[in-house]
Amino acid sequence: MANTFFGLDIGKSGLFVAQGGLNTTAHNIANIETEGFTRQVIEQKAGSALRANGRHGMIGTGVDVDAITQTRSQYYDEKYRNNNSIYGGYSTKSNYMSQIQSYLNEIQLEGFTTTFDKMHDTIQELEKDPANLTVRTQVTNVAQSFCEYFNSLFTNLQAVQEDCNFEIKNQIDRVNAIAAEIASLTKQINAVEIGGSHANDLRDVRNVMIDELSSIINVTVEETPNGPVGLKDYVVKIDGQTLVDTYETHELKVVPREYRKNQTDADGMYDVVWDNGQQFNPYAYTQSGSLKALFEVRDGNNADNLKGTVTAYAGMYSVTMKNPTVNEEAKLNIPETGEITIGTVKYEYESFEVSIDKDTGDYTYEFHLKEPVRAYADEEVSSVGLTVDYKGVPYYMAQMNEFLRTYAKKFNEIHKSGVDLNGSAGQDFFTAANKVTGREYKFGVYGEDGGAGYDPYSFNSQTGEFAVEDVSTVYSSYYHITAENICVNDMIQHDPRMFAAASDIVNGIGNYDKAEELMELKRDTTMFKQGKPAAFLQTLVAEVGIDTKAAINFEKSQNNLVNSIDNQRLSVAGVDSEEEAMNLMRYQQAYNLSAQVISIMNQIYDKLINYMGV
């Protein structure tokens, strides 16, 4: 049964609830520009009714504040984060692919095209006066500029690769930092909510962390009740593996590679592993985000790495790969020392040899391992390096290497079939320097039977030499020419008389038939399937242009989608100034009415006490 002054309690409850609504609305308005803030609402319910003895039943007791909660949609959160991961990947690719495009565009501007044309123009000038040492010097100087252009292009592309590698480390550090902060916030949230309260502002901070994490890597979040009222487990996973388990975190680590995955990779590229030793696969199709994009740009080889089949027995230190996917010296891009995967087992190799079938031209690779084979392999699928189905830095470097090796080989063959002004046989015009020894590689000219004492059909990766028997001169494979080290033969640079412009000088030094053959290489349509030499690189430029344009278009499209989803999310969780202004008026009116109830009750009790008392 209610007491005599029960009406004051009802009016007071209305004042308190209206005051709570005003304070909540003021909090929303104050945070209207706060990033990640979620609109809060006061949830109210009728107070517990009192049972009355009369026939009228139960008597209401006023109103109570049930909770102050957030108006947030888990559906829109998940949708936003999934698409934000995709956007993060396209944004990163757009940035780095634009850099690659800017470097390769030089091919069609003042880089390759100008130098290539000028080199052939100077060779044409040599036809007018083959003995002119000034023109001969111009030929070697312009040819060296041609090499230096590719040296510079290599340096620029490798810088992009190193930038990606550096950013990978930064991204991993940021992921770990976010994970630690999420675990700390979860502990604070549970400490507040275990008593039944709602840690709304702390939850907003945690959600902002999850949003940022989603741009780096795709995440899933699961929150489940555990134990006492308000206590919850909060688990964050990336690609199915746990990053945060309520108060505990599992960190990712970057580990420098011991071996390169591609021949032209920069040293010290990072792999990523979990702190508990579990493998982390950044290339998985289920992955997305800026981290995966960085790995793809850094390691992408368009899935063109060496693959084949291996049969090996336990205890063997050498394995032979047959049916390889690479049967051209110009396209070979595996490192001199590295790792070969047989089935699912990785082995380190210290060198490899290539044998070429004289009749079919098929390649057979023999890898010399640092440790013996641990298990029998019967035509197991084997690979060297990574299979990354994206056109990143390694792919474009491999394309440049293919061009240079093919062109240099053809140029050298013609040059070595001629004689210089001294009557000596022509040397290799284009060569490359060994980074360790500084020795310039030499490339052999073989007769129809391979030449006495030589086996031109095999070479060793470690020595860079073809197999040689009973001869003192060694010859190297064009595999060792890359955009990084191609150069003009040092002897020819110092003595332009050694440029072999003629097939012979028996009839005088005015012969220039070999120079004419060299000049015609510019128009040779048999060297590359794309057509003339310039067409090969122009196709490459067009290719990177298409890839870059696609990345930019996808970035814009995905950005529009993310913004659209974010707007939908804000329609639920965001603060609307007009709506809050209406709430202010609503709660103000409710407060005034409750105050009026108390005022009227005060008048009633005044009459009751002061005028009806004895």
Image: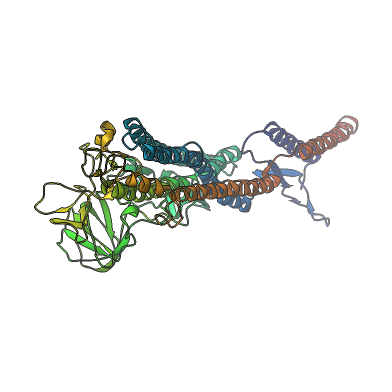
**Residue 240 percent location from the top left of the image:** 45, 55
Quadrant for residue 489, please give it. Answer: top left
In the rendered image, the vertical position of residue 203 relative to residue 369, given as above or below: above
Query: Residue sitting at 63 percent across and 51 percent down?
Result: 76
Which residue is at the front of the view, 371 or 537? 537
Q: On the picture, is 486 further left or further right than 604?
A: left
Position of residue 12 measured from the top left corner of the image (x, y, whole percent): 76, 36
x, y percentage for residue 360? Answer: 28, 67
Residue 366 in sight from this viewpoint: yes
- x 38%, y 51%: residue: 280
Locate residue 555 relative to residue 116 in the image: left or right: right
Q: Quadrant of residue 207?
A: top right
**Residue reaching furthest bottom?**
378
Q: Quadrant of the C terminus?
A: top right
The residue lying at 62 percent from left, 46 percent from top is 556
Residue located farthest toward the left when viewing the structure as drawn = 470
In-image side of 585 versus 272 (left or right) = right
Which residue occupies the foreground of this view, 111 or 291? 111
Looking at the image, residue 68 lies above or below residue 287: above
Residue 230 percent coordinates (x, y): 55, 47
Colour mapping: rainbow
Picture mark count: 0
Q: Is residue 385 visible?
A: no
In the displayed structure image, the side of residue 88 where residue 47 appears, left or right: right
> Which of the pair 560/263 is nearer the observer?
263
